[in-house]
Each structure stands twice: as C-alpha cells, then as structure tokens.
Image: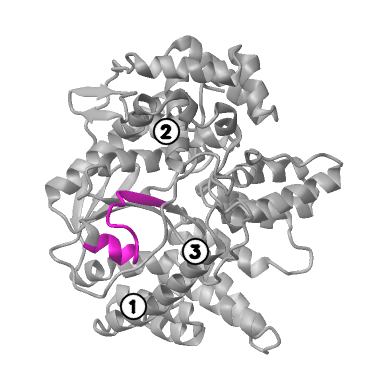
Amino acid sequence: MNVIKLLAAIVLATAAFAATPARAEWQRAETDHFIIYGDVSERTLRTYATKIERFDALLRTYYPIESDVQIPKLEIYLADGARDMRRILPGGSDSIAGFYSADAGRIYTVTNISNPEAMSTLFHEYAHHFMFQMSAEAYPSWFVEGFAEYYSTVVMEPQKIEVGREDRGRMLMFTQLGANEWAPLADVLKWRISRSGRARVFDYYAQAWGLTHYLMSTPERQRMLSQYLNAVIRGADPIAAMQTVIGRTSVELQNDMRRYFLGRITYYTPQIDIPMPEVAISTLDADQGALVWFDLRLDDTPIVVPPDNDPDDPRSQGRRAELAREAAQHRAELITDALAAAARRPGQRMAMLVAARAHRLKGDPAAGLEALEPLLSDTSTDADALRIAAALLMDQVKAEPESGNTASRRRLAMSYLGQAMEHKPLDFRIYLGLNDTRRGHTGYPTANDISTLEVATALAPQADENRLRLAEAYMARSLWGEAKTMLDPVANAPHPGADRVRARSMLAAIASATGAVAVVDEEPAAAP
C-alpha cells in the first residue's frame, strides 16, 4: 500500500432556496473527471474546471486509483454568493465556502465562488471524494480530515505547483495558543466530534492538519505514516500504534509538532508535468437553468427522514429539535416552490422531472407518474425519467402491498430500470433501484443481488447507503469479513449521524455472530 490511500468527508449541511429566475445563462463545463455547472462567466467556469482537473491529476500521480469500473464524473455546482447558497442551503450561514454531499440521492459538491476560501474548500471536499474512491480502508478520523486539509492548500497555477503550503487559519492555533491550551494529542488520535467538549472543533481540525503536515514533511516521516496507517487499518490502537511506529509518546510527539510549527514548515514544488486539460463548454437551455437548484435539492432531500439517534452528536437536544423543525419547514417550502416553478414551464423535460420528484416527496406517487408520462415509453432513452418512474412505482408497492397491482408495478419498475441502465450505466442509483425491487423476496439476496450492490458500491463508494446495503447482503450470506470491510469506514466517520449508528449496530451483530469484539474509535473520557 502507498504512503496513503485515503478518503472521507466534511459535509457542511442540507438545503433550500427561493423560486427566482436565473440571473444570466447557465453553462456546463466538462473535463475528463468532472462536470461543472454555473450561472457565471465562461472564464470563471473554465478556471474552476481547469484547476480541479489538474488537482485531480496531481492526486492521481501520488495515489493511483485502481478500479474495476469506469469512475463516474463528479458534479460541481458554482454558487455565486449568499443568494445562491440560500437556494441550496436555506438558513445556512453566509460564510459557508462550500460543501460536499454523498448520499443515495446524489453525489455532488457546491462551491461559493464569492468566498475567498472557495478554491481551497473545493480542493478539501474533492480530497475527501478522491480518498473514498481510492480505497475502501477505514482510516483514522484525524487522518481523514488531515489529508483533506493538507491538500486543500495546494497552489495550482499554470507554471507553478506547490504542495504543503500553510493554512493561515490553522496556523493561528499553533502560534497563538500556549502548549497547555492544545487538545491532548492522545485525544485527537481517537477523537470524533462529540459531546465530550474536550477540544473545540476548530482545534481538532487544526491539529489533524498539523499532525498530517508534520508526518508528510520528510520522506522518513512519510514512511512512518504509512506504517502507522497500515497498523491502524489492521486493528491496532491509534495511540499505541503511533508510539510504536514513531518511537515517541503522544506528549513528546505533540511537543515535536509545536517546535515544527514555530519554525519553517516544509512545502514541496513537484517537478511533474500536469498539462492543461481540455474543457468542453456548453449552454443549458433557459428552463433547465432556471430549475438547477430545485433539481439538485430534490435529489438531495431524503424521502424518509433519517432518525436523529447518534448518542455522540455534540448538539443539544434543544438545538437538534430546532433544526428538525427548520428542516421540516424547508421541506414543505421546497415541495410548494418546486411544483410552482414546474407549473410555469409546461411541457419542458426538466419541469416534468422536478414535478415528479416534488410529488414523490409530498407522498403522491400517482401524481409523480402522471407528471412523467410524456417521457415514458418502451423506447424511452431518458434514463433519469425512467429511474424516477421506477422509484415512484416502488413507492406504490410499499404503500399498497396487498394491492392486486403489486406484481405488475414491480415488473414495470424493473423494466424501466433495465432501460435506464442501457443509457446511463454509470448511475449508481439505478442499481440501488434494482435492489429495491428485489428486497424482501424469497431467497434474497442471491448472488446476482450481491453483484448488483457491488456494482453500485464500486461506482459510488462515497455513499453510505451503498456500503450499508451491501454489508447487509453479505451478512445474510455469512460473509462477515466482506461486510466488516464495507462498514468500518462508515462506523468510524468523523461526523455523527444515523448511518454511523446503523454501521456500528451491524458491526456489533457481526462480532456477536463470529465471537469477535466490535471496535470503533471511541471518544476520550470526559475530563474529571
């Protein structure tokens, strides 16, 4: 294994906006690995497309991705200031520079180009996406964030590439806080964002970046980092493994870091040729551009609201209840505004897709299917319409399991998904849809069911739902090791959530079935 094969996430929130027309003309830039959308100038669109494609080439130079499938292109949306950000993140802070979302509905990132940290945030978020694509291993939480932070400061200019530049905000912690004000490194090595209050979130990210930077600063330390990561992946305790590999206690290592950051930190100027990529620019039609944020948000909003059940969530119960109320309000507003926007554009393809998903979110699959009817036929090549129609049919099956139409609806859903796969074979959601048509059948999961989920996960390992479903299928066939490999990254995610709780519960079930001990990173005990 290379010095680092990695991944993870920083996900900064969920959703909304007002129904207002696009300011100018939405355009689309496509490169080898990305599709970038923006209601911005062609120059701006081309600049972002060029930099992120060259950044990807830099990462692949050091961490080649091995995959049995063609990797789908990541969608990036350029938001031009707080107005656009409120359309996708209603109630979100105006200071948000961007976020990354990877769930069963869609995988994408949004970048607020009006924020001075826009490019570094995009690099950070893509580093998470890249890490998950590169490896299925469960890296320690501090390194997941540290890796993304380390590469977020890359300078990517036509004649100059610099890796390892300082993050001025993070450096403030190292230069302004006294040594006794740092979070103990032993806590950082095992800590996730939780209720313990032992360290502020900003300090955690700063020290995760700092430890990664220190261990990447010389070839010898890079080799030790590789040995440490391999040991933790094999199940070693993060604190004990660090002392064994580095030869320093956590206190001694923290002092070494402090001295390093009080001096001159190391950065690299790779002597590699990364050519300027080809960027194809096209223009979206006016109706599609006007509905971009609705299209994105409707895919991102879950049909079933996940439980708020993570005991390590650092937010108070009152704050969580407040956020739940706000989310419900934003959800209702999304349905109303999306249906109104679609109604203003009768006969337009994107309006039909928006209306269908808004009706589905409202709990009215029949109305959703009616909205899609012009796009559906035995010869349809519209993979998105076919996939959404299949989901609506399965909603009817679940809502009316005793109906005489259950079998025919299920068969039609499978037919639509088969058509969709022919025309968009890299869309992991189609394979999840096929899985939906099979779940609960006698003999499930068959070898073919498992193969379907394996394809979905290979296409989008970043989506927790893919990993959880595949692990569930493996467990049903007593493939405990394979299931654990799928679950470990979810169970050790840095951020709280229902998926993490579900993964831990499944790991506990595996441990019970095999007589092993379920181990995930634990938050440090509260200070006495």
Disc 2: CA contacts within 10 A as few (<14), some (14-19) or many (>=20): many
Decide which of tag 3 and tag 2 comes sooner along the chain.
Answer: 2
Asked if one can make out residue 381 in the rendered structure from this viewpoint, the answer is no
Q: CA distance from mark 2 to mark 1?
A: 40 Å
Magenta span has 464?
no
The residue at which mark 2 appears reads as 206
Element at badge 1? helix
The image shows residue 257 at horizontal and vertical percentages of 46, 19
Q: What is the number of callouts on the image?
A: 3
The residue at which mark 3 appears reads as 319
Decide which of tag 2 and tag 1 comes sooner along the chain.
Answer: 2
The quarter holding residue 368 reads: bottom left
Q: Are marks 2 and 1 in contact (CB under 8 Å)?
A: no
Pick the quarter of the image with the C terminus: top right
The image shows residue 80 at horizontal and vertical percentages of 20, 56
Q: CA distance from mark 3 to mark 1?
A: 28 Å
Q: Residue at x 49, y 64 (%)?
A: 319
Q: CA distance from mark 3 to mark 2?
A: 25 Å
Above or below for 327 versus 159: below
The image shows residue 41 at horizontal and vertical percentages of 12, 52
Does 491 sit left or right of 110 as displayed? right
Residue 427 tag number: none
The mark closer to the camera, 2 or 1, is 2
Does 44 sit left or right of 398 as displayed? left
Above or below for 335 versus 70: below
The image shows residue 228 at horizontal and vertical percentages of 60, 21
The residue at which mark 1 appears reads as 338
The mark closer to the camera, 3 or 2, is 3
Q: Which residues are magenta?
A: 83-100
